[in-house]
Image (cartoon, rainbow, N blue to C red):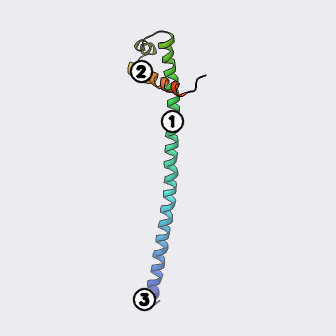
Amino acid sequence: MGSQSVRMEVRREAREAQARLREDRKAREKRLSALGEEVMVSLGERDAVIRDFEQRAGRALRQMVDVEGMSLGEAAHWCGEGVTQAEARRLRMLAEAEGSSEPAE
């Protein structure tokens, strides 16, 4: 095999190797893109569920204060050690914000 044909063969092999690398990178980027999308969708779903439960807790706190006549501190104390007055205030504000964005029944 002549020097010219060896060079041509090596160049062809190099181009093929580079093409395989590009395809591998493209496939990896596609997988990574799908995985990144899955992460964001999962976190968005998690946030929506948390928001729903926090609004539910806030509605219960509002009832304790507005209907049962408790102070927010008393309501937080009634809920146990897991709910501070600051957390109760935050949850109640979430419920109030939810109530102001819903149409009247």
Q: Residue at x 52, y 34 (%)?
A: 48
Cα separation, mark 3 vs mark 1, equals 64 Å
Find residue 46 and name its label: 1
Counting labels gives 3
Disc 3 vs disc 1: Cβ atoms closer than 8 Å?
no
Q: Residue at x 49, y 35 (%)?
A: 47
Secondary structure under tag 1 reads helix
Quadrant for the C terminus, please. top right
Residue wearing tag 2:
89
Cα separation, mark 3 vs mark 2, equals 82 Å
The residue at the far top in this view is: 69
- Which of the two labelled residues, at mark 2 and mark 1, occupies the earlier sequence position? 1
- Residue 89 percent location from the top left of the image: 41, 21
* In this rendering, position of residue 53 left or right of residue 85: right
Amino acid identity at mark 1: Arg
- Residue 92 percent location from the top left of the image: 46, 21
- Which of the two labelled residues, at mark 3 and mark 1, occupies the earlier sequence position? 3
**Of discs 3 and 2, which sits in the foreground?**
2
Residue wearing tag 3:
3
Amino acid identity at mark 2: Arg
Q: Nearer the viewer, residue 41 or 9?
A: 41
Q: Residue at x 49, y 44 (%)?
A: 39
Find residue 34 and name its label: none
- Residue 80 percent location from the top left of the image: 43, 16
**Of discs 3 and 1, which sits in the foreground?**
1
- Residue 17 percent location from the top left of the image: 47, 71
Secondary structure under tag 3 reads helix
Crowding near pointer 1: few (<14 within 10 Å), some, many (20+)?
few
Amino acid identity at mark 3: Ser
